Image: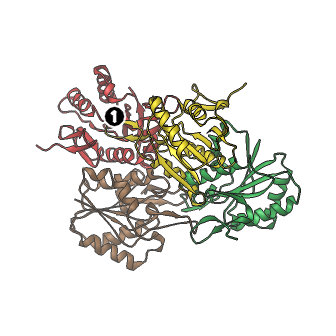
Chain colours: A yellow, B green, C brown, D red
Amino acid sequence: MIRVINTGGTFNKRYDPVNGSLFVPADDEAVEAAAASLRHGCEMKISGTIYKDSLEMDDADRDLLCEIVAKVEEKAIVVVHGTDTMDRSAKALDRWLGRSHDKRVVLTGAMVPFSIDPVEATANLAMAVTAVRFLEPGVYIAMHGLVLPYEKIRKNREVGIFEAVVP
Amino acid sequence: MIRVINTGGTFNKRYDPVNGSLFVPADDEAVEAAAASLRHGCEMKISGTIYKDSLEMDDADRDLLCEIVAKVEEKAIVVVHGTDTMDRSAKALDRWLGRSHDKRVVLTGAMVPFSIDPVEATANLAMAVTAVRFLEPGVYIAMHGLVLPYEKIRKNREVGIFEAVVP
Amino acid sequence: MIRVINTGGTFNKRYDPVNGSLFVPADDEAVEAAAASLRHGCEMKISGTIYKDSLEMDDADRDLLCEIVAKVEEKAIVVVHGTDTMDRSAKALDRWLGRSHDKRVVLTGAMVPFSIDPVEATANLAMAVTAVRFLEPGVYIAMHGLVLPYEKIRKNREVGIFEAVVP
Amino acid sequence: MIRVINTGGTFNKRYDPVNGSLFVPADDEAVEAAAASLRHGCEMKISGTIYKDSLEMDDADRDLLCEIVAKVEEKAIVVVHGTDTMDRSAKALDRWLGRSHDKRVVLTGAMVPFSIDPVEATANLAMAVTAVRFLEPGVYIAMHGLVLPYEKIRKNREVGIFEAVVP
């Protein structure tokens, strides 16, 4: 069983025609749609929380995310998260879980909302959901073809793409 | 380096407005589009061959596919394939490669053309491209959330979904 | 009040993943979706009948269409129709309605299913629904930017585009 | 010959993945795409100017638009415009053109960017491009199924839909 925890971020953004802007909805529609075909063969539980652009996440939000990840009974956990502070939440999760835990946590997200173009968001989620079955316990980020321990991957903000940290 | 070999199938189908039907084009447009964001971080070589609906593949086509898979230098190989005879090509590949080879081959495809709805096709390809990094040598099928040795997964033709073979 | 009568055709085609082909569904989903924003300001009644690829329409189908068009109380009527025999149905409607009637009938359709790419289908329907308010009584075809009496426009089958008949 | 003058607005908005927001691009891509199938049969010249969200248009922009509309040789003119100040530009055009001119000007736009969902934008543009052939000289707004003299239609800002002004 894989647990998918949706926290919001660009992956989920939808367009509001009345005020003419994108917003993070308080639902899991985009994640459900991206995961629909994967769920046929893969036991997956999708739930949501926080529902924020990750630039607006504060310490209380991150504590809440850590608590949920620590508490859920599943060992394989995918977190859908905004890309801007994905690294900070990954670090918080790593500290919260401590040494010798048995959870595989993979954070993922998207640079383009699923509602605007579903390809990148779906690819990232599918990569995360697949990798989480094979990884050793730890906290990882899966984005743009990479699946790496969180401290070995970073967002290149100039081009909007995640890349491996060159040591 | 991951090698993606596109052989056609529903994944690639496009609509021809002049004759009003879907056809398998002799190109890799759909696979390139589905893999676009994955390629940022993952060395991947995409090439194509055969370009057929898998119901029209014959023994010569399957021999050609086996030859290509055996010959390419990459050890991690994803084959995009029509779903109807994916199992037969997987079996042919398994026999051709024999015992003690060092290749991880993952076949995948789609029930809905990428050009009609990209979500399922992208999810399947991303799952295959991710799993192929972690698997032991062998021949696998990755479809609809499942990644299994080819003889442990089959297409349920009535509902159009791949499922695990219940022993 | 505008009456839209959906008879099927490519405009409506959807993909069936189980048998891998496009079919004309016995519903008005595509027409409803293409007309959704137009209906805010324009009284429009959408109904369907026949639901066939127009190559499969027979004389009985055409008689039925003529009867419906003659019988409905609206004077402004748009018929969504397959492109291959749109001209034959237009001619049948013209004969059925006879001289001195007071109906403006505009046939339209699409070369690409709304479900595959909504742009052409929506453009054709919007053109028909707009033109029908301004035209004199008669039978017209609205396709690909043209709105003309039915005998002055024809489908160029080689390129899949409607064009004006050069006298 | 119909002249389409694109001034920007929501119709044209595209998503920028790097800064995570929608912007009005300085090009006519969306208008060209929405008009593609209409152009087969309809002589149409598309050009662009200003390229702004209409809330950011100032008097100089409106003067420029009026000058262009007055100067182009075509008598049938469609203006793609942001919805928020479409009424102000229509009024400015009406005053600029004065009495007894021979131009039919139809303003249109969209509440949802063509790049997010092409249906409404395409429907509005097709309605404008069709109506402009049939109207008497004057300045009109074509939105959401309505084609009316500009002072008889207004944007209901609460629901994001244009509606007829009830006298």
Residue D92's x, y, as percent? 23, 27
Q: Nearer the viewer, residue B158 or D110?
A: B158
Residue drawn where x is 81% and y is 45% of the image: B74
What element does badge 1 sit on? loop
Q: Amino acid at mark 1?
A: His
Quarter containing the C terminus of chain B: bottom right
Q: Is residue D128 left or right of residue A154?
A: left
Residue drawn where x is 47% and y is 37% of the image: A64
Whether residue B106 is situated above or below residue A92 in the rendered picture: below
Q: Is residue A78 left or right of residue C37?
A: right
Q: Chain of mark 1?
A: D
Q: Is residue C144 left or right of residue D65?
A: right
Q: Nearer the viewer, residue C144 or A148?
A: A148
Whether residue C139 is situated above or below residue C146 in the rendered picture: below
Identify residue for label 1. D81
Residue C137's x, y, as percent? 24, 61
